Image: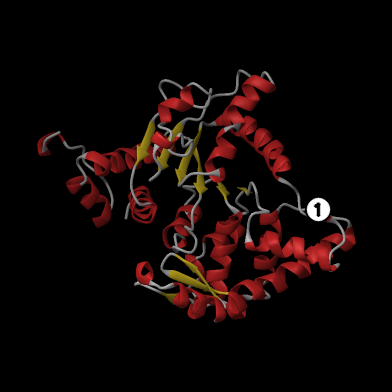
Amino acid sequence: MNKKTQPKSSGGPVSHFIQEHFRHFNAATLGDAARAYRNHLDGGGRMMVCLAGAMSTAELGLSLAEMIRRDKVHLITCTGANLEEDVFNLVAHDYYERVPHYRHLTPAQEADLLNRHLNRVTDTCIPENEAMRRIEEAMLEVWVAAEQKGARHFPHEFFYQVLRSGKYRKHYQIDPKDSWMLAAAEKDLPIVVPGWEDSTLGNMYAAALIRGSLKNVHTIRTGIEYMTWLADFYTRTAKKSPLGMFQIGGGIAGDFPICVVPMLHQDLQRTDVPLWGYFCQISDSTTSYGSYSGAVPNEKITWGKLGVDTPRFIIESDATIVAPLIFAYVLGW
């Protein structure tokens, strides 16, 4: 497509830069996906964002929080790590250490980070005492309180209780507007966290049961309950407006929720429920290894998840670069 036929964009300098320079290959797909995201919302659609990898430690909240506040995101599905790591960063940002030369660390240097209670995620180290243990204390308090009342809640609901209490506001070390979990709590945004047990706080919850600080394993609601909740949410939402899916990375954060549609159709015979209305995945996985996370969107047609006419995109690139750019375009920055 030559310059004269490039569609015009609305928005600020980032949007104009994408429109002017992102014309081919993965860059062109980024622009197409961003425009389709915006068109999906403009047409009355709603959007689910799926977070895999370490996007919270990558501080995606700098753009995602504003997407939530501006009603550009209506549901989040994320790993337990992304749920907790945004809050870790919120209360302990000043104690994080960046290791730009992480590719050249020796095993002895890695052991030194361990001895200093710094858990490395690529080029960033999460401080155990200031982040993880501080939030463990907060979560144990609400877990015990729920257990004593015989109440049960989803993992994200316990986080909302802690954030809304204001008890840890004095510990905030970033601008609160840059925390996507704070934005979600303020909006009461629905969150689905499949496999929450595979997270730092999931391990801490298990440890609390083992040592006897907690007695009831069922205080935390499970992934199956998340799926039954999602089935109801999807059925109600899709009747009024199409629901799209914007997937960052692979794995359970995307694989779990996308399956709700074939479950509704094939297992519950709710064949009148629409398919997903938009799909985009940012991925660096590859199908040559049989990777489901790297499967091209067309494969999802055969599983009854997407339709022939569903706008669908796969951007094979670094999500820490691509996701903020697409969010900036959707926000009109």
Q: Is residue 12 something that shows in the picture?
A: no
Q: Which residue is mark 1?
A: 152
Q: Residue at x 50, y 80 (%)?
A: 112
Q: Quadrant of the N terminus?
A: top left
| 63 shown above or below 30 | below
Q: Residue at x 46, y 37 (%)?
A: 291
Rendered location of residue 81, percent (x, y): 58, 58
Q: Residue at x 39, y 51 (%)?
A: 319
Rendered location of residue 205, percent (x, y): 74, 62
Q: Is residue 268 something that shows in the picture?
A: yes
Tell whether 115 sits left or right of 141: left
Q: Quadrant of residue 128?
A: bottom right
Tell whether 224 sits left or right of 234: right
Mark 1 residue type: Arg
Rendered location of residue 88, percent (x, y): 57, 69
Report the front residue among 176 and 94.
94
Colour scheme of the picture:
secondary structure
